[in-house]
């Protein structure tokens, strides 16, 4: 795990999988989490050179320093990953190890990021996704909305998610599959089927990320792109421990490491698409919107 950890904030209401996740109808800010004593955590480093760029490096300083925006887009440029995958099984444990199918059994027709972050993601898709009748896109961890532009045109937009009712309500999907990727990370699609694979605000729930990213690589066409977007919100009892114990810059490197160690991708990149008001002084302290990041990688041609 990363060498410096964000402190947890008290006061969260505990959720139980047996209630189908009712305690968390909408994602919470990831800073509001159970105490660290309730997790089994590894405190190993991803890289010794990470600390200076890490969000946790500003913790404990002045409020103004905590509110400063860190240029996360530079973190992956020329980054040298360790020779071996630095995480252990404990890093992918969750506070709630109960059935994910039970947790997501009740449909949630809500959005888990605010309108500014949603619009930023939609604009990013509009500018970077291929379009046309021969284009095929896969939206994993999908739901009732895919955040694609309303006029987005593709021959196929396949969805894979956890709730049939949510997926059925998504007007942009041409087909869908209900599947728990933590139980079965193998994707039910032929090799080289898709031009793009999307995952919106759900990469932090994946307990078998290397297996999943290897599958993403398999189903992508040569030169195809995978886009992992995330904010600072999550269902805290279901997010993996290495995520809940770290901050946004660390998350960029964590997701970047998934691309790197899965193999067969070009060096991953990051785009900070946070709404402009996120960079204003005290924005984080005053809660003036959700940040938004995309870590993406192309399959080697």
Image (cartoon, rainbow, N blue to C red):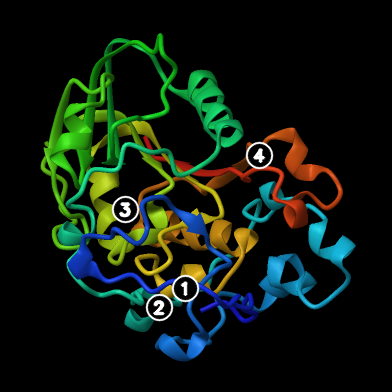
Q: Which residue is mark 2?
A: 91
Q: Which mark is residue 242?
A: 1
From the viewer's perspective, tell me whether residue 121 is left or right of residue 50: left
Which residue is most to the bottom?
Answer: 37
Residue density around tag 2, few if under 14, some if 14–19, many if 20 or more, within 10 Å: many
- The residues tagged by marks 2 and 4 sit, at their Cα atoms, a distance apart of 27 Å
Residue density around tag 1, few if under 14, some if 14–19, many if 20 or more, within 10 Å: many
Pick the front one: 263 or 195: 195
Residue density around tag 4, few if under 14, some if 14–19, many if 20 or more, within 10 Å: many
User: In what element is the residue under mark 4?
Assistant: loop
Above or below — where is 242 with respect to 170?
below
Residue density around tag 3, few if under 14, some if 14–19, many if 20 or more, within 10 Å: many
Going from N to C along the chain, the mark reached first, 3 or 1, is: 3
From the viewer's perspective, tell me whether residue 239 is left or right of residue 167: right
Which of the two marks, 2 or 3, is nearer to us in this view? Answer: 2
| Residue at 54 percent of width and 66 percent of height | 81
Which of the two marks, 3 or 1, is nearer to us in this view? Answer: 1
- The residues tagged by marks 4 and 3 sit, at their Cα atoms, a distance apart of 25 Å
- Tell me the quarter of the image containing the C terminus: top left
Pick the front one: 115 or 121: 115
Residue 155 on image: x %, y %? 24, 13
Q: Which residue is mark 4?
A: 274
| Residue at 43 percent of width and 66 percent of height | 236
Going from N to C along the chain, the mark reached first, 2 or 1, is: 2
From the viewer's perspective, tell me whether residue 292 is left or right of residue 192: right
Q: Is residue 277 visible?
A: yes
Going from N to C along the chain, the mark reached first, 4 or 1, is: 1
Pick the front one: 274 or 214: 274
Q: Which mark is residue 213?
A: 3
Q: Are marks 2 and 1 in contact (CB under 8 Å)?
A: yes
């Amino acid at each position: 795990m990363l060498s410096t950890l964000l402190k947890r904030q008290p006061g969260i209401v505990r959720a139980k999988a047996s209630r189908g996740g009712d305690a968390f109808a909408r994602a919470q800010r990831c800073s509001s989490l159970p105490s660290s004593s309730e997790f089994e955590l590894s405190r190993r480093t991803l890289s010794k050179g990470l600390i200076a760029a890490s969000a946790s490096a500003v913790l404990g300083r002045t409020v103004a320093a905590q509110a400063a925006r860190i240029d996360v887009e530079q973190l992956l440029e020329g980054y040298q990953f360790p020779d071996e995958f630095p995480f252990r099984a404990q890093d992918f444990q969750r506070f709630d190890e109960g059935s994910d199918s039970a947790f997501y059994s009740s449909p949630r027709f809500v959005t888990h990021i605010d309108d500014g972050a949603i619009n930023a993601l939609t604009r990013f898709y509009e500018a970077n996704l291929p379009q046309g009748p021969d284009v095929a896109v896969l939206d994993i961890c999908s739901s009732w909305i895919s955040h694609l532009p309303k006029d987005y045109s593709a021959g196929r937009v396949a969805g894979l998610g956890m709730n049939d009712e949510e997926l059925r309500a998504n007007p942009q999907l041409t087909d869908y599959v209900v599947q728990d990727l933590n139980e079965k990370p193998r994707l039910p699609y032929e090799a080289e089927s898709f031009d793009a694979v999307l995952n919106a605000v759900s990469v932090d729930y994946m307990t078998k990320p290397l297996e999943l990213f290897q599958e993403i690589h398999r189903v992508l066409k040569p030169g195809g792109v995978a886009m992992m977007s995330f904010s600072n919100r999550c269902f805290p009892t279901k997010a993996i421990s290495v995520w809940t114990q770290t901050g946004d810059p660390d998350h960029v490197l964590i997701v970047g490491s998934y691309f790197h160690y899965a193999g067969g991708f070009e060096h991953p990149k990051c785009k900070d698409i946070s709404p402009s008001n996120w960079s204003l002084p005290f924005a984080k302290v005053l809660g003036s919107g959700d940040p938004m990041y995309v870590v993406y990688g192309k399959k080697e041609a």
